[in-house]
Structure formats: structure tokens, C-alpha cells
Amino acid sequence: MKNNTLLLILTLFLFSKQGFAQTISVYGSTVGEANVTPSGAASYIIPIHTPRGVNGFQPNISIIYNSQSGNGILGYGWNISGLSSISRVPSTIYFDGITEGVNLNRMDKLALDGNRLICINADSTEFKTELENFSKIIGGKSDVSYYWFEVKTKDGSTNYYGTTEDSRLRPLGNWSQPLAWYLSKSTDPNGNSINYFYTNQNGEIYIDRIEYANNSIQFIYEDRPDKNVTYFAGASVSQKKRLKGITVKSDGQVARSYSFTYNHDGLFSHLASISETGSDGASLNPTQFIREGINANSTAYSALVETQSYKQIYNADLTGDGRSDVVVTYKSSVESNWTDWAFYEANADGHSFTKKYSGKLPSGFKGFYLSDIDNNGTYDIFMRVSGVYSYCCIQCDELKPQNAIVKPDSLLTKSDAIFKEHSEKTVLPPDDDSNGCCATCSYDRQYMNAYFYSNGNLVRNEQYDIHFDFIKGDAIIYAGLNFDGDGKSDFLILDKSKNFVGVKVGNTYFSAQVFSNNPNDVNLLDYNGDGRTDILVTKEYNSTIYTYNPRSTKFEVLYNSGFPTRWHSVHF
């Protein structure tokens, strides 16, 4: 290989903070391909050179970026492609008739690389995939779990999962039950094989090397600053390493090597560059990934909340694309009435927004209330004007009732119980009964009342004992939360001044304080992308994010900063 000095700046995508541009050499650069996925994500694939195997039987390994992915083994949005696993997944209404998290028992469901497995025999040892790929899948099991899986594909090859101890991911705290079974061996009809080896310790697993014919692919790692631990069912899995390099050998000699460098923004690792070196020791010009600012037609989320104007911000998926959109209301002073609104639709990157609609608010506007009341996956928005609730279409030129699925009259019959005016928060549905259709809830000092959507009305009042009989006076309850990641509804109770009062996590009820001293605002969202609800507490001059640790059953500080403050009213 020869070094080349002529450079071309190529902007692949203009995203928000998670986007990037690529600096490459015109000649002799590392090969890569940009694309857009069916879901609208920007993707970039860099194939890893693999020496030819016998009869062309060899692994197909790539480094892949997806703008909709979370924190991966190569930083935010980046992962290794070409590996495979069978893992436990939650039960869902669609497949199972119930909603249930992963409990590390025989009731857990399974998926092959995200494709749900459907059992096709009585003793639960043979499966097919939901999206038919004509593979025959056999599981070797005991009374409580599976030891391994064998997948025979339509091209005649056979893939083995979990047949070696290092290829079974066992969570820390529950070593007896594997969470996932990773690909350990592949064979073709001629008996040629590819073997996969893993580093597997303390609830963390990552590919160590791949061997086939006289070839090998070695993966090299380093400690990462953005370590992450995910908890469920009393156990945990970790992500404490990131990929530092790859060495490809043929007949014991280095055929190709890759090295990776990173930046860290205080929260996540971000891939900064990839360098490729050939068997002669000569390197191509590095491929650099520069995180871009947003384009001229987009607005960063921080720009929506940072300005010290009087506004309220509501976050919810109002378009059904799986991304959280933003509705902003404005007024000129603390004492004045709300006058204007604007709707910002989330872009494909999920971190920047495009203004779509805006308008004037009606006189007497009190606030928006959001709930997926018909359980179709898209939040519905209700507007309260001087005691009257109206169902609204936010993507309209004007705010007005639009073919209400729940007529205002049916809401008014329970309006005082359903919406607490002083909370001004998203009304989140609990799903403890696992029927997936609970619309909204109210509460008293000891019980939570659940209202359900049926034939255009809120009906069937069910009651849950939340065991908070120690609550004195008015309080605010947030339902539908998931502090421990088990997929079941948890609750947070605040008093009238938004001080912490109590929490129900799973079957545990406790009243130990997390925060007090009258915070200006409390918001609930998964801030670090681990699938669990976190708590953002905003005070006069700083803010703190708390995350729940299921092992210690305590809330711990995830983040502390001078932003946002009391001037930034953020509603999730």
C-alpha cells in the first residue's frame, strides 16, 4: 500500500450532534458505503477484509453505523456486524397476550438476531422465525433453561449457538440462567467450519477472535470511559470495553489490521477515526468521523430549552415514527397568559427537530395533556381551556378538536380525577394488568384508579393498592415508568411542592428520600439509553439526573450540571 496526500472533504450526512462528516483520501482510502435504512436512519458500512476460506466459506464482518442505534461496542451508533446470537426477549401483547419483562426463567421468549422465535412443537425444543427464513431451529434444554441451539439454514449450513461456555452470556447475579447464546460455530455441507471465541466475564461478553481454515480475525479492546450496567430480574450485564483494533491473519501472517480512535463528550464515546494497514506495513489515510452541527433547517433540542424565555416544552411521539417530537408553548412573562404554540417534528437522527406548524393559543389555555389513549403507539394530545378538555390534532393549521376518538364530554365526566392541574405533566398509563390498553389514571392517598379506552369512551375503573397510605395532603403520581428495566409499570410519588415522597419499583414500596428542598421541576425520561427511566431534578441554578440501581435498590446520581435551571421548563 502507498500513502496518499490528496484529501477530499466529503460530507456524508448533516445531522444534529450525533451526525458526522467523513474526511477521506481520494485514492487508497478505507472502503465504506453510505445508505439510508427503511426506517429512515443514516447508515455507513465498512467491510473488514477477510481472507478467502475453503470453497468461499468465510465470515462476513463489517463495522456499521446507524443513526438510530444507541451506545455500541465502537461508541455511539457504531457496532460490529456479522455476528449472531439468540437472546431472551420480553413477552408482548401481540405474540403472547401479556406484557412481561425478561425474568430469566422458562417463561421468557426468544429471538434470533431480533427475529422473534415461534415454538412449533409441544416440548418447546423446535422453533421457526416470525419472519420466515426457512431455517430449522432446535434447542437443547433442561427443565428451566436452554443449553444450546442449532440452526440449519436453507443453504445447507449449520450454525451452533451457546455450545461453548464462553459463548453463553450469564448475567452477574444469576449465573445459572444464560441471557443470550452467541454463535460459537458454523459449518457448511462440506464440513468446513468457522469457530467463534469470546471473552466472557462479570456479566460482559465480547468477541475475542474468529478462526477458519488457516485464517484468524483477532479483536482488541480497551477500557471505555462511558461504562454502562443494565439491571433486570435481580441480575446485571455490563458494557465496559470498546473496540481498539482488529488484526486479520492468513497462514499466521498479518494480512490486514485496523485501529480505532475515539472522542468522549462527557457522556458517550464517539468514533473519531479508522486507520487501515496492509501486510506490507503501509497505512491508508485515516477515515475521520467529525460530529457535525445541525443544518440550517433544523433546531437542536438544546436551542429549544436553553433560551431564558417563558415556555413550556412537551415531548411525545405525535407522528407515530418512534421518535419523540416537541410541542412548545410561549408567553411573554410569568404573570401573563400563554399565547402561542409551535410543533417541532423529530428528524431521522432523533436529536434535532424541524418546525412544522405554529399558531395562536385560545384564551383561557391551561395546558396540554398527552396520553396514548387508544394504544395505537402514537400519543394523543388534549388541550384544557378553562376547565374544558378538547381532543386536538397538533399537526393542523389551528388547534381545534379533530374527529375526537374520545369526545370531550366523556372526558369531562372524570376530568377532575384524571388530570391534576398543578402537575402539568404527561399522563402516563400503567400496564400492571398487562392488557396493554390502559389509557390514563388518577389516584388518592392509597389507591390508583385506572381508566381504559373502549369504543370511544373512558370506561372501567380499576383500582390498584399502591401502599402509600403515609401520603399527607395532595400529591402527584407518575405511572407507567420503568426504573428497573423489567418492563412492568413503576410509580413515582411527589408531594405538592414536587419533593420526593415514595416509589414503587416492581413489588417494592419505599419512601426513602431521593431529593427534596422544593425542586423547580421534575422530569422523567431514559437519559442514558439503558432502557430504564431516569429522574431529572431541576433547581434554581443546577440540575441532577438520578438513575435507579436495582442491586442496591437506591437512586444514584448519574449527572450533575448547571443546565438546565429553573428558567428551562422541560416537559417529557
Image: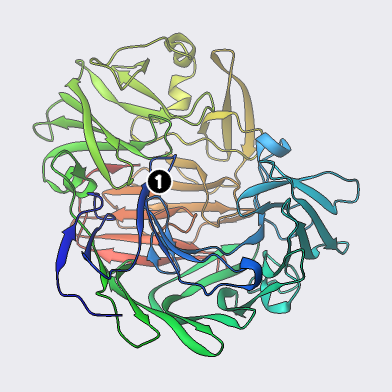
Residue drawn at (25%, 40%), measured in percent from left and top?
A: 353
Quadrant occupied by the C terminus: top left
Extreme-left residue of the structure: 332
Q: Position of residue 94 (x, y in %)?
A: 66, 34
Mark 1: few, some, or many residues within 10 Å (few <14, many ≥20)? Answer: some
Q: Where is residue 122 in the image (x, y as percent from the top left)?
A: 91, 46
Identify the secondary structure beneath mark 1: strand
Identity, as a three-letter code, of the amino acid under mark 1:
Asp
Q: Which of 266 and 262 is in front in this view?
A: 262
To which residue does mark 1 refer?
495
Q: Is residue 78 left or right of residue 314?
A: right
Quadrant occupied by the N terminus: bottom left
Above or below, 71 against 394 in this view is: below
Residue drawn at (33%, 17%), measured in percent from left and top?
A: 387
Q: Can residue 456 be seen in this view?
A: yes
Residue drawn at (60%, 69%), measured in percent from left and top?
A: 58
Extreme-right residue of the structure: 122
Above or below, 24 against 258 in this view is: above
Q: Nearer the viewer, residue 342 or 201?
A: 201
Q: In this view, does 184 lie to the left or right of 67?
A: right
Q: Where is residue 402 in the image (x, y as percent from the top left)?
A: 37, 11
Q: Quadrant location of residue 257? A: bottom left
Q: Nearer the viewer, residue 238 or 43?
A: 43
Q: In this view, does 151 lie to the left or right of 380?
A: right
Colour approach in the figure: rainbow
Q: Position of residue 173 (x, y in %)?
A: 66, 73
Extreme-front residue of the structure: 55
Q: In this view, does 51 lie to the left or right of 358?
A: right
Q: Can residue 514 be seen in this view?
A: no
